[in-house]
Image: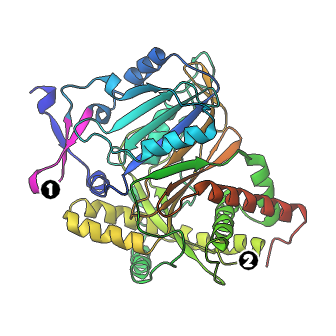
């Protein structure tokens, strides 16, 4: 049998993410690598051939069954050419960070060609840092953790490329209790998680300026670097982890943003959907979707900044003890076996009862190199599943943290204002730490 005739059905989870695709909300994961200087694109293509293309999904396309009955299948692309997926581009003048962000937003807004393997890589030869790599991968191929790990597999720990780069499995910002194979440890945990999901389904999220009818144009922006040591210092002084501090800064930034858009009600909470990786720490590097979701109510309306951090920490502690993530992973797999109509009904519940998708992933601690060039920064975004207008990503790398925001232009026309508000909220927490605010309330 020739390679072109060999097909494999998508896993149930991968099929679910494929069918969530909508013109107003493309199911793609996007990653940006900011490089310290230009690299040799031919060398990069050799690296891609050696390290990426052995993963079959990068050479396969998806074929849907007529009427979308049954799972779609992966088929090898008989006419695969790497140069259809790797593109050299130049930014228009002045080629500054704002122009690069506009380019990333344009890429985010463009559907992938369903007749080809569902990924693209853009080499931006005149990015403000020196150069940049922008990668898009459809969620049906893999989740954000899979994409980040694959990109790290291209890197090395030294400019000469003699030492492989650090390629751990990021565990996500909210570790949760797991049982065997990522399944909830107890029947009580399953019942409790299902009860929580039922509550989410029945309880609508707060209506704010962060929700609305989506368009087809997405915008990408990111913060300046925040020192990881500084974030740790703030957390230690105020009684929280790095994750507590960053999530609290996001909640504070949302509060500041909403104050400029019709105000913030007392004790307002908005619900964030947080992906949680369910892979084992020793699992081999593979594609696919292996994550669950948890629902975190952000205490946006708590005005006391340190009190907000402690309330957020209390809510996250409750999530850590639940089986919510593993149960939803199972539900997503079941959705991939159902009809598109059932799946869309669940997606609509997510959109109606949530405001944003938020990710917080710890990346490599030491600087990495790609084709001899230092990788200065990493930023990535997962899609806003559930027809949500806002995605917030937090990624640490080489001693610094970047906050990325992806937003629907029809709902959030100036995402840079939101990013600035999150940064300002963090600096307020740092000031509280300097002032010796008590760590308990």
Q: Answer whether residue 42 is magenta in the image.
A: no
- Residue beneath disc 1: 68
Q: Is residue 392 left or right of residue 240?
A: left
Give the crowd class for mark 2: few <14, some 14-19, many >=20 residues within 10 Å: some
Cα separation, mark 1 vs mark 2, equals 49 Å
- Residue beneath disc 2: 303
Give the crowd class for mark 1: few <14, some 14-19, many >=20 residues within 10 Å: few
Residue 293 falls in which quadrant of the image? bottom left
Kind of element beneath mark 2: loop
Residue 128 visible in rendering: yes
The answer to whether residue 409 is above or below residue 211 is above
- Residue sitting farthest toward the front: 93
Point out residue 24 in the picture as x, y percentages from the top left corner. Answer: 36, 57
Q: Is residue 333 left or right of residue 97?
A: left
Q: Residue at x 27, y 63 (%)?
A: 335
Read off the magenta span. 60-75
């Amino acid at each position: 049998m020739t390679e072109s005739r060999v097909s494999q059905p998508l896993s149930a989870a991968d099929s679910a993410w494929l069918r969530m695709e909508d013109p107003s909300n493309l199911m793609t994961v996007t990653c940006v690598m900011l490089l310290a200087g230009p690299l040799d694109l031919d060398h990069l293509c050799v690296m891609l051939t050696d390290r990426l293309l052995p993963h079959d999904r990068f050479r396969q396309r998806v074929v849907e069954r007529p009427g979308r009955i049954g799972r779609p299948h992966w088929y090898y692309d008989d006419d695969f050419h790497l140069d259809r997926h790797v593109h050299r581009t130049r930014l228009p003048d002045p080629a500054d960070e704002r122009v690069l962000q506009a380019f990333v937003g344009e890429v985010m807004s463009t559907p992938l060609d369903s007749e080809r393997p569902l990924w693209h890589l853009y080499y931006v030869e005149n990015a403000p840092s020196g150069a940049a790599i922008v990668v898009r991968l459809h969620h049906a191929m893999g989740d954000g953790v899979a994409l980040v790990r694959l990109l790290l597999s291209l890197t090395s720990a030294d400019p000469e490329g003699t030492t492989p780069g650090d390629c751990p499995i990021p565990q996500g910002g909210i570790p949760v209790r797991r049982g065997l194979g990522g399944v909830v440890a107890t029947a009580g945990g399953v019942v409790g998680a299902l009860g929580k999901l039922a509550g989410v389904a029945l309880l609508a999220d707060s209506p704010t300026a962060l929700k609305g009818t989506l368009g087809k144009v997405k915008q990408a922006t990111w913060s300046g670097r925040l020192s990881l040591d500084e974030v740790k210092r703030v957390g230690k002084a105020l009684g929280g982890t790095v994750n507590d501090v960053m999530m609290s800064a996001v909640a504070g930034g949302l509060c500041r943003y909403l104050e400029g858009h019709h105000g913030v009600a007392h004790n307002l909470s908005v619900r964030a959907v947080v992906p949680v990786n369910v892979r084992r720490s020793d699992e081999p590097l593979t594609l696919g979707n292996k994550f669950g979701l948890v629902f975190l109510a952000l205490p946006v309306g708590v005005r006391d900044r340190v009190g907000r951090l402690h309330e957020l920490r209390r809510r996250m502690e409750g999530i850590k003890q639940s089986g919510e993530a593993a149960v939803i992973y199972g539900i997503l797999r079941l959705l991939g076996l159902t009809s598109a109509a059932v799946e869309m009904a669940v997606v609509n519940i997510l959109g109606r009862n949530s405001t944003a998708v938020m990710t917080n992933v710890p990346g490599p601690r030491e600087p990495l190199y790609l084709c001899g060039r230092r990788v200065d920064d990493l930023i990535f975004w997962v899609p806003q599943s559930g027809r949500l207008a806002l995605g917030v990503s937090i990624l640490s790398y080489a001693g610094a943290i970047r906050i990325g925001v992806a937003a629907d232009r029809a709902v959030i026309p100036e995402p840079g204002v939101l990013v600035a508000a999150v940064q300002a909220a963090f600096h307020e927490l740092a000031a509280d730490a300097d002032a010796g605010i008590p760590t308990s309330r």
